[in-house]
Amino acid sequence: MIPAFLYALVGVGLFTLGLYALIIHAHLLRKILALNVMASGVFLVLVALAARTQGMPDPVAHAMVITGIVVAVSATALALVLMLRVRIATGRAELAKEPLE
Amino acid sequence: MKKSNNAKPITENDSRQAQFRLLLAVPLSALAVGLGYAVLSLPSQAPGLSDHVAAKLEISGVSNPVTAVLLNFRGYDTLLELGVLLLALLGVWSLGAAPKRREPSPGLVLELLSRLLVPLLILVAGYLLWVGGHAPGGAFQAGSVLATAGVLLLLAGWRLDTRFSGLPLRLALVAGLGVFLLVAVVLMLAGGHLLEYPPSFAGALILLIEAAATFSIGTALAALFLGGRPEKGSHR
């Protein structure tokens, strides 16, 4: 089953790229996008490794990924609204280096 | 990264950042190699739980294994997942009212296209909900298609009538979780365990839960898109 491992390795790559962007960028929107890229990498690994069967892929991993996608979407929406609040409060969509007064 | 506004093109800060990026690439490459090695060292054949699912698929009420896992074998996960969706919406709403956007007129194309597309999207959502019983599909896919219809309407300038933005909207949001919990509790009182469906009408129960969940997921995602609590009287 070479394709399954190929997709899983792409997932690992996406995860690492997302982690790099998460650390490098200060802008919160970029951080949120980076977290989403990391989540996509994890989902890709799970779905790819579920295909290591004869015939039907493992449905439990697929169900986990569906659950994960919904949770990721909810968390992203909450994070975006929090980012807008930070921008309204400080004028910048970045976390302050020093604690606010 | 934002370049500093100084006149000097390359400041000490910039070169330190470049150094930091290079330094960061080293541990992250090591992490990628380690994770890749871990993935490749897994056995190439691993049935996982698919044999268990296939063995019990007949009594689950549906013939699509993913739906059987989501709504029957691991129904608890899905129940709590609907709770997470509502929790996120609660968080968004508690941060304040929806920002007042002054949208420009959507234009003839978007207006007419949304009128054409929204009924089609609702139809597709219904199809996905029904097909989830025996093929890829189900409540979450149908719910997200339904939410797309809602987002399209919101972009085209449509707002929920004020009569519905209070209690009826909240009822629509909790319908999925409510029906799911109701079924769970009734089945428990009837002598089973939590979420233990009797095989004879498991299919009907799953369809009922999925229909309510689709409606709630679609509404919740569209409400999340709005980015805040609907104001009494103006917004959805």
Image (spheres, coloured by chain):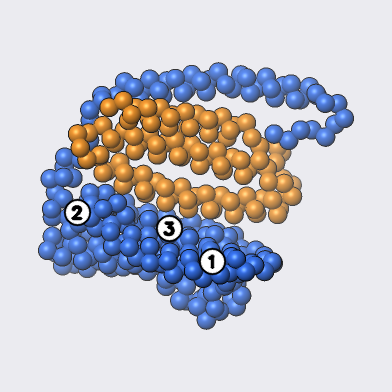
Chain colours: A orange, B blue
Q: In this view, does A26 lie to the left or right of B94?
A: right
Element class at badge 3: helix
Query: Dividing the image into 4 quarters, which one contains the N terminus of chain B?
Result: top right
Query: Which residue is the site of mark 2?
Result: B63
Q: Which of B116 and A18 is in front in this view?
A: B116
Residue B135's place in the image compared with B167, above or below, is: above
Mark 3 Cα within 10 Å, few/some/many (few <14, many 20+)?
many
The quarter of the picture where residue A33 lies is top right
Q: Is residue B209 left or right of residue B1?
A: left
Image coordinates of residue B103 in percent, x first then y, are 67, 66
Q: Which amino acid does label 1 sit on?
A: Leu
Query: Which residue is the site of mark 1?
Result: B113
Query: Which residue is the site of mark 3?
Result: B144
The numbered mark, 2 or 3, whose residue comes first in the sequence reads 2
**Label 2 to label 3: alpha-carbon separation:** 22 Å
Residue B100 visible somewhere in the drawing: no
Element class at badge 2: loop
Subunit bearing disc 1? B
